[in-house]
Image (cartoon, rainbow, N blue to C red):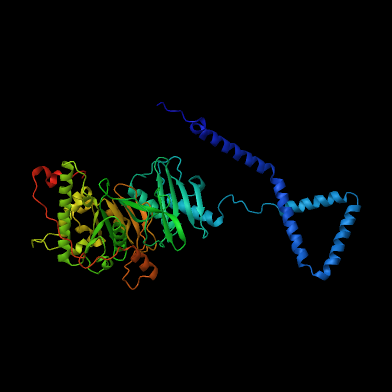
């Protein structure tokens, strides 16, 4: 069947609509310019009438009669004298024009204090953006700052909130050290206690510095609207991600830009590494991930610190185990490695037989490991290390629908093996940390300055080779902690699944890995890894 061409209004209507909008906007601007005197007179007459009504309302009742008689006599005298009505009309129109004038002062530039700040920034940048060989330098001592600061804005305190700087083409803006010096200087000169973002345009030789608003900390754990395989790690700036999620907080329901992590067989970053100091919110993030993972999968929780932060998950539907002791943790991780092998082998058998993969093999299995450094064993004792047991889930977890999430402190990141670092390409850094620490975990530093006071759950996130995003983790405290508020405790408990019966709550038994022939060996079924 031949395709019918689109109607003309659908194929070429956008250009006509654009021209119509431009014509309407031009006509409106022209009409405003022509009718501006009439608008001014109307506004002035309205103000004069309002002032007259207020004066009449303020006049005592015993004086209103004489006042009305005096006004009538004045009107009669004006009407009888030659050219009286014309002069009265001119006087009223003049008073109306004066009262209706636009009294908003038009700023043509910065005031004296703002000019001094811009001059100080200009002089501070001279040693970095000038050389002795430049015949026409943009930056020179005593030069004109308005030639390089093409855009600027100030906040209510008179501090710079936005600045656009034009720098010479020979500045080494491709070197991180050169950028860091300029960013540190502008941060110090523009005022500390705020968070700044620096956007470098190497092609146009432009630098834009802007002040960022603090990320909201009012969002708590809740059901997020996501697709299967998507997990909300936190929330970021509105212009950083193209997607928003409906969320609820104390102010009601609104849309917030979410940092969504995608897992599954087609994920390029199937495993996650979270780094931060104690109290930075790493355990909060793992609890938030666990609550979301239980909606469509099973979880294994291994807590190396042994403080009982995940006791609320014990015995719940979908929670296979919550281990705190070293012996139980290693046994659980060994079971997870065997389960990963079993899933790979069974899925490969089903594909070779031409059958669909069983549903229980595609149900996601999440391994949440908090502080793996606490489970490290002395070398040479014959006991497998926790990281050794994680090698199979990390390497083959994407094909087997197994997701590994690790949380570790900065002081113990050096103890993570090469396998962990290679396969955890989704990274999150939380808490107060230096730019060097952020770069050591994420692979590159953020384009923003660190927050002055980082609340729990505040940090940066990066997926693979993507951009570094600011992130605020939704508050997910331990509901059994006495310091948890009632509202947050109720929010977390409402998301937890029901408890299992005593018979169902036993520890998971590892499925036996049967001996198979060479075509279905483990090395032969690492599909997509």
Front position in the image: 469 or 170 = 469
Task: State which quadrant residue 48 falls in.
Answer: bottom right
Task: State which quadrant residue 166 falls in.
Answer: top left
- Locate residue 148 relative to residue 346 in the image: left or right: right
Name the residue: 86% across, 50% down.
85
Front position in the image: 178 or 390 = 390
Which residue lies most toward the top here?
Answer: 2
Give the quadrant of the C terminus: top left
Q: Position of residue 52 (x, y in %)?
A: 76, 60
Q: Is residue 422 visible?
A: no
527 relative to 100, above or below: above
19 relative to 254, above or below: above
Front position in the image: 460 or 476 = 476
Front position in the image: 373 or 304 = 304
Q: Is residue 263 visible?
A: yes
Q: Position of residue 257 (x, y in %)?
A: 40, 53
Q: Position of residue 251 (x, y in %)?
A: 47, 62
264 relative to 25, above or below: below
Name the residue: 26% across, 68% down.
311
């Amino acid at each position: 069947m031949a395709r019918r061409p689109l109607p003309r209004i659908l194929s070429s209507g956008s250009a006509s609509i654009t021209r119509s909008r431009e014509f309407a906007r031009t006509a409106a601007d022209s009409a405003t310019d022509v009718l501006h005197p009439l608008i001014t007179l109307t506004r002035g007459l309205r103000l004069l009438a309002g002032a007259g009504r207020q004066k009449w309302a303020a006049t005592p009742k015993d004086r209103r009669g004489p006042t009305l008689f005096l006004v009538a006599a004045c009107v009669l005298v004006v009407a009888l004298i030659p050219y009286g009505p014309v002069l009265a009309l001119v006087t009223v129109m003049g008073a109306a024009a004066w009262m209706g004038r636009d009294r908003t002062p038009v700023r043509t530039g910065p005031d004296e204090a703002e000019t001094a700040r811009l001059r100080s920034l200009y002089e501070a940048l001279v040693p970095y953006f000038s050389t002795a060989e430049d015949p026409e330098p943009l930056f020179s001592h005593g030069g004109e700052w308005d030639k390089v600061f093409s855009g600027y804005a100030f906040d209510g305190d008179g501090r710079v909130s936005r600045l656009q700087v034009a720098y010479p083409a020979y500045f080494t803006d491709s070197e991180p050290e050169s950028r860091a010096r300029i960013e540190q200087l502008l941060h110090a000169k523009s005022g500390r206690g705020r968070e700044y973002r620096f956007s470098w345009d190497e092609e146009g030789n432009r630098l834009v510095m802007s002040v960022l608003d603090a990320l909201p900390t009012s969002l708590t754990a809740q059901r997020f609207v996501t697709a299967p395989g998507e997990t909300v790690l936190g929330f970021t700036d509105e212009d950083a991600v193209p997607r928003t999620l409906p969320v609820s907080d104390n102010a009601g329901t609104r849309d917030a830009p979410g940092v969504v992590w995608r897992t599954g067989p087609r994920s390029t970053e199937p495993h996650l590494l979270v780094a931060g100091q104690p109290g930075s919110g790493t355990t909060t993030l793992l609890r938030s991930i666990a609550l979301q993972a239980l909606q469509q999968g099973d979880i294994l929780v291994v807590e190396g610190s042994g403080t009982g932060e995940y006791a609320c998950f014990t015995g719940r539907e979908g929670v296979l185990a919550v281990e705190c002791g070293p012996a139980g943790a290693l046994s659980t991780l060994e079971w997870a490695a065997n389960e990963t092998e079993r899933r790979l082998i069974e899925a490969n058998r089903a594909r070779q037989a031409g059958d669909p993969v069983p549903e229980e093999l595609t149900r996601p299995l999440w391994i949440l490991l908090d502080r793996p450094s606490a489970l490290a064993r002395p070398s040479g004792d014959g006991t497998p290390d926790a990281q050794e047991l994680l090698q199979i889930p990390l390497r083959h977890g994407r094909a087997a629908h197994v997701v590994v999430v690790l949380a570790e402190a900065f002081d113990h990141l050096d103890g993570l093996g090469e396998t962990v670092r290679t396969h955890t390409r989704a990274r999150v850094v939380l808490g107060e940390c230096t730019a060097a620490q952020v770069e050591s975990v994420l692979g590159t530093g953020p384009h923003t300055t660190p927050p002055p006071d980082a609340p729990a759950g505040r940090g940066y996130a990066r997926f693979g080779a993507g951009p570094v995003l600011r992130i605020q983790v939704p508050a997910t405290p331990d509901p059994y902690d006495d310091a948890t508020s009632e509202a947050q405790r109720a929010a977390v408990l409402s998301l937890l699944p029901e408890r299992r019966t005593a018979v169902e709550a036993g520890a998971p038994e590892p499925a036996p890995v049967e001996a198979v022939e060479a075509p279905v060996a483990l090395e032969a079924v690492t599909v997509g890894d």
